[in-house]
Amino acid sequence: MRILKDRTAALIIDIQERLFPFIFENENLTKNVSKLIGGLKIIGIPIFVTEQYTKGLGPTIEPVATTLGNLPRIEKMSFSCCDESRVMEGIAVSGRENIIIAGIESHVCILQTVIDLIRNGYHPVVVEDCVSSRNVNDKQMAIARMRQEGAVITTVESILFELLRYSGTEQFKGISKLVK
């Protein structure tokens, strides 16, 4: 399945202050998610952002929030983003069926969202180096389950260049700077 930019949106899930310090390899996650968001913005991919129970978990972490800029955050109480009507309405209105997924935690909100997206006829594209959990085993098991359920598993650099398709453009130059 080729992932084309005009058929793709992104969902950045719950990268929040109070949980983030406990996430496995969180420094790499910060760099990779920021790279992904920057690249998606260059390419023009619609981005949806969720925050789980902000009163308890706080807002999106600062480096990621800066990269997101003024993109609205959708607060949710459900683990699956698909149980939040504003997320599903936004995705439906976008008309995109491929949904790039990044965020935390892999074995809870990411996994449940991916399963529900598939059930609703979407094609989740999980960016493996842009998702994590507190425990590495939980992340590994979640990736295996998502693959088994039918999700595409990729990396940040791979998905950005797949969405680009061509070199020699201004977008290519911007992406090339990001991934160096």
Image (cartoon, rainbow, N blue to C red):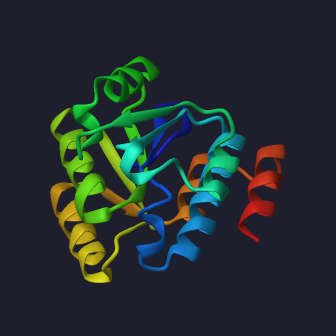
Task: From the viewer's side, name the closer residue of 164 and 101.
Answer: 101
| Residue at (55, 62) in percent of width and height | 156
Q: In this picture, is 88 found above or below 145?
A: above
Residue at (58% x, 75% y) in the render: 27
Residue 80 at x, y = what percent? 24, 43
Q: Residue at x 34, y 70 (%)?
A: 133
Left or right: 54 as drawn, with respect to 44: left
Along the line of sight, the residue nearer the viewer: 136 or 20? 20
Image quarter in which the C terminus is found = bottom right
In the orientation shown, which residue stands out farthest toward the top? 93
Question: In the figure, is residue 3 to the left or right of 35?
Answer: left
- Locate residue 146, reporting x and y percent: 23, 60
Q: Position of residue 129 (x, y in %)?
A: 48, 70
Q: Answer whether residue 120 is visible to the viewer in this image.
A: yes
Left or right relative to 69: residue 1: left
Q: Position of residue 52 (x, y in %)?
A: 36, 45
Can see residue 165?
Answer: no
